[in-house]
Image (cartoon, helix red, strand yellow):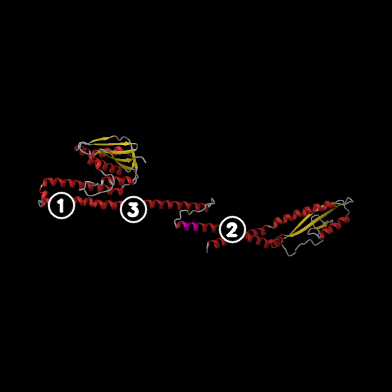
Amino acid sequence: MKIFPKMFIQIFSVLLVVTLLIHLFVFLVFPKPYLESRKDEIYRKAEEISANLNGESLYYVQESLNFYSENSEIKVIIKGNHNNNAVEINKDVGIDPTSSNNSLIIEERTITLNSGENLDVQFISTADMQKDARDLSFKFLPYSLLLSLIVSVIVALVYAKFIKNNIEEIKSVTDDMMLLDKSASLAVTSNDEIGDLKRQINELYFTLLQSIDDLEVKNKEILKLEALKYDFYRGASHELKTPLASLKIILENMQYNIGKYRDRDKYIANCIEITDELSQNITQILSLSSVDHLKEDEAEILINDVLQNVLDNYRVISKQKNITISNRVEDETIYINHQALTMIMSNLVSNAVKYTDDHGEINIGVDNDWFFIENTYKNVKALNTDGIFDVKFDINKKTSNGLGLYIVSSLLDNYNKQYKVETTDKSFIFKIKING
């Protein structure tokens, strides 16, 4: 059965049983209060009649009492000179001889006649309590049962309809939620269990939407990272193949003493230089491949702590080129992953040392929340900064770009850090926004 007829039948059955129990209770308990009511009624009548007949003649009293007895359920008898403990009944007082539940009620009063004589009068009434209760119950039972039935039907209909409407509302709104309608929401109009259920469904749905939005953002980041990896490894493979091809050509020409390659000492030095380039490229490729495994454990990191470790690694190379390094970074911090910052600093310092002229300078510091590395470079005017962060993998070309700045830009983009390059007449400057 569906919930509406099921709840209607259940609620109606409960109310019907309660109604029947109430009627049964009234039927069983009714005799006692009914008897007390009859006693009170006879007492009041006896007081009223005896008070009205005081001071009247005997004839008037007898006629009045006879008239009242004939027209009332209460019989009035003038007491004779018989035993005080005996009740003389010389009239029909309504006793049912077939019933075992007769109750006899007697109220005795004294009336003073106009002659000064006292007259004892007995007010007598009988009551069959069960019969009266049954007759009264049967008299009003059809109306009370009908009224109870109507009330039960109305209450059952209203309550079942209320529950059904709430469930249908929940079902309708959750259907919209299944379609990921972001405007879908249950109207909470009460603080009862149904209101709590609606409120919890709303909170659950909003949490689900938030999780879906987070997943969409992460999926976009993953797709972006996958595209980045694809472009990188496609270019990186060319970066490795180009010097390898050049190395092979030089070695083959040296093997067969072809032309200028007879000068083996010169081209052995070239081979060593190409090998160094390959080694550096392989190191950079391996370092970038670990970007996927960087944990989301950003923290406020002292830039100088990381920078000093990197500078120590390049101290020997810089001395060979007689490069002067000036580090004016103090206690400035940046919110980023520690490993990522190490890779960024390593590539920036490596590029600065590599491209700084002999007896040149490298200046490192922070200016207006911008961290910068500035290195002198004689050919800076010929440097085209457009596309400087793109990878160009032909090492034989003067316009070739290595992987260093590409790795730096990828990491800074990953952590939403602003960066830019600037040039002066004699220097190249790389800047990173450390706050914001």
The quarter of the picture where residue 320 lies is: top left
* Front of the two marks 3 and 1: 1
Badge 1 element: helix
Counting residues from the N terminus, which is met first, the one under dot 3 or under dot 1?
Answer: 3
Please name the amino acid that badge 3 sits on.
Answer: Leu
Please name the amino acid that badge 1 sits on.
Answer: Ile
The quarter of the picture where residue 41 lies is: bottom right
Residue 109: horizontal and vertical position, in percent?
A: 81, 52
Taking depth in this image into account, of 390 and 314 the one nearest to the observer is: 390
- Vertical placement of residue 275 versus 425, above or below: below
Taking depth in this image into account, of 320 and 256 the one nearest to the observer is: 256
Picture disc at residue 249 = 1
* Side (left or right) of 229 relative to 243: right
* Front of the two marks 2 and 3: 3
Taking depth in this image into account, of 434 and 102 the one nearest to the observer is: 434
Residue 45: horizontal and vertical position, in percent?
A: 79, 54
Q: CA distance from mark 2 to mark 1?
A: 94 Å
* Front of the two marks 2 and 1: 1
Please name the amino acid that badge 2 sits on.
Answer: Val
Residue 143: horizontal and vertical position, in percent?
A: 68, 61
- Vertical placement of residue 161 versus 346, above or below: below
Q: Pick the quarter of the image with the C terminus.
A: top left
Badge 3 element: helix
Task: Check disc 3 and report the residue beneath it.
Answer: 223
Residue in the image at 75% along x and 54% along y: 39
Counting residues from the N terminus, which is met first, the one under dot 2 or under dot 1?
Answer: 2
| Disc 2 and disc 1 in contact, CB within 8 angstroms | no
Task: Check disc 2 and report the residue beneath it.
Answer: 158
Magenta range is: 172-176
